[in-house]
């Protein structure tokens, strides 16, 4: 019994340190960025499932928070957007991606990213590989859920509306995340080291800002009542609808989201070309 406190302390330390990145392994895995594109994406997905699985823990945490908040504040159809299936799926897609998983893609994998950049891998390629990996892990399951709900609870003819609209927050969030990832990349460190550096107000402030920023940006990508909802579902379709026709509304949404994504990845690449990548 006298050794019990020491045992608990040792276990606590090992759990805290488990979140630490592994520099040698990460730098060696950076060679995957140079592989042919499909193989590079597969390698990225495999890397995300490699301990400490920082990205997946962020996704899982936000998924739980989204479910809890949905219980606290249920979604209700409103206005012209009365498709509850679309509301629920876009809500989960936005909430899950409102995390440093998206807005700190480079900092969370900084050893591997810096090694890849040093080897000549352009930022746009790094971001594209990571985007596609996130699409497979988060986007595809969300879209499949939307398809299943639509077929079972509604009618297959509604898929032409449901799938593009659910894809909108996923794609637009990735675009926003690409730009933020180069503007404020913060290195992933073990919590124990963060605690030891707690008196360093500058570093602590940057880290807290990076953690809080995606939740602040959630207002922009909020599928229920934020800027994205008003612009994508109301303003732009109302302006373009008379020209292209009402049936094209969902694809107008998707085209706008794709534009946001392209702008995000191009702007991120230009930023790094001009100012370099500085991991804080």
Image (cartoon, helix red, strand yellow):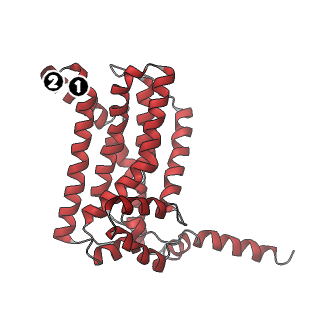
User: Which corner quadrant holds the N terminus?
Assistant: bottom right
Q: Residue furthest right?
A: 1
Where does the image place residue 206, in percent across and percent down from the top left? 38, 66
Dividing the picture into quadrants, the one containing residue 269 is: bottom left
Residue 244 is labelled as: 2
**Looking at the picture, does residue 88 appear above or below residue 275?**
above
Seen from the viewer's position, the closer of residues 31 and 179 is: 31
Note whether residue 276 is visible: yes
Where does the image place residue 163, in percent across and percent down from the top left? 37, 32
In percent of the image, x 52 and y 75: which residue is there? 193
Determine whether label 1 and label 2 are within 8 Å by CB. Answer: yes
Residue 248 is labelled as: 1
Seen from the viewer's position, the closer of residues 118 and 136 is: 136
In percent of the image, x 47 and y 75: which residue is there? 199
Where does the image place residue 226, in percent across and percent down from the top left? 33, 36
Where does the image place residue 49, in percent across and percent down from the top left? 52, 61
Q: Is residue 123 left or right of residue 144?
A: left
Q: CA distance from mark 1 to mark 2?
A: 6 Å
Seen from the viewer's position, the closer of residues 80 and 73 is: 80
Q: Residue furthest left?
A: 243
Q: Secondary structure at mark 2?
A: helix
Note whether residue 181 is visible: no
Q: Is residue 190 left or right of residue 178?
A: right
Q: Secondary structure at mark 1?
A: helix
**Looking at the picture, does residue 167 appear above or below residue 58?**
above
Q: Residue furthest bottom?
A: 24
In percent of the image, x 54 and y 66: which residue is there? 52
Q: For mark 2, does the 10 Å Cα neighbourhood hold few (<14), some (14 to 19), or many (20 or more) residues?
A: few
Q: Is residue 101 left or right of residue 178?
A: right
User: Which corner quadrant holds the C terminus?
Assistant: bottom left
Q: Is residue 240 left or right of residue 10?
A: left
**Looking at the picture, does residue 265 appear above or below residue 199?**
above
């Amino acid at each position: 019994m006298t050794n019990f406190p020491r045992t608990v302390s040792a276990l606590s330390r090992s759990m805290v340190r488990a979140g630490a990145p592994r520099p040698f392994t990460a730098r060696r895995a950076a060679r995957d960025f140079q592989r042919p594109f499909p193989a590079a994406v597969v390698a990225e997905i495999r890397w995300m499932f490699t301990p400490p699985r920082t990205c997946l823990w962020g996704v899982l945490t936000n998924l739980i928070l989204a479910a809890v908040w949905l219980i606290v504040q249920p979604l209700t159809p409103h206005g012209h957007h009365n498709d509850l299936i679309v509301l629920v799926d876009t809500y989960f897609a936005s909430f899950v991606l409102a995390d440093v998983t998206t807005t700190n893609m480079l900092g969370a994998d900084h050893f591997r990213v810096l090694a890849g950049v040093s080897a000549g891998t352009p930022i746009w390629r790094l971001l594209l590989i990571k985007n596609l990996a996130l699409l497979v892990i988060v986007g595809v399951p969300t879209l499949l859920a939307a398809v299943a709900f639509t077929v079972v609870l509604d009618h297959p003819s509604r898929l032409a509306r449901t799938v593009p609209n659910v894809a909108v927050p996923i794609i637009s969030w990735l675009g926003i995340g690409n730009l933020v990832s180069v503007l404020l990349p913060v290195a992933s460190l073990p919590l124990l080291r963060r605690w030891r550096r707690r008196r360093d107000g500058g570093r602590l402030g940057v880290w807290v800002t990076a953690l809080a920023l995606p939740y602040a940006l959630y207002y922009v990508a909020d599928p229920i009542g934020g800027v994205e909802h008003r612009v994508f579902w109301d303003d732009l379709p109302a302006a373009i609808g008379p020209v292209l026709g009402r049936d094209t509304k969902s694809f107008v949404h998707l085209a706008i989201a794709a534009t946001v994504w392209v702008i995000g990845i191009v702007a991120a690449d230009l930023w790094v070309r001009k100012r370099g990548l500085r991991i804080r």
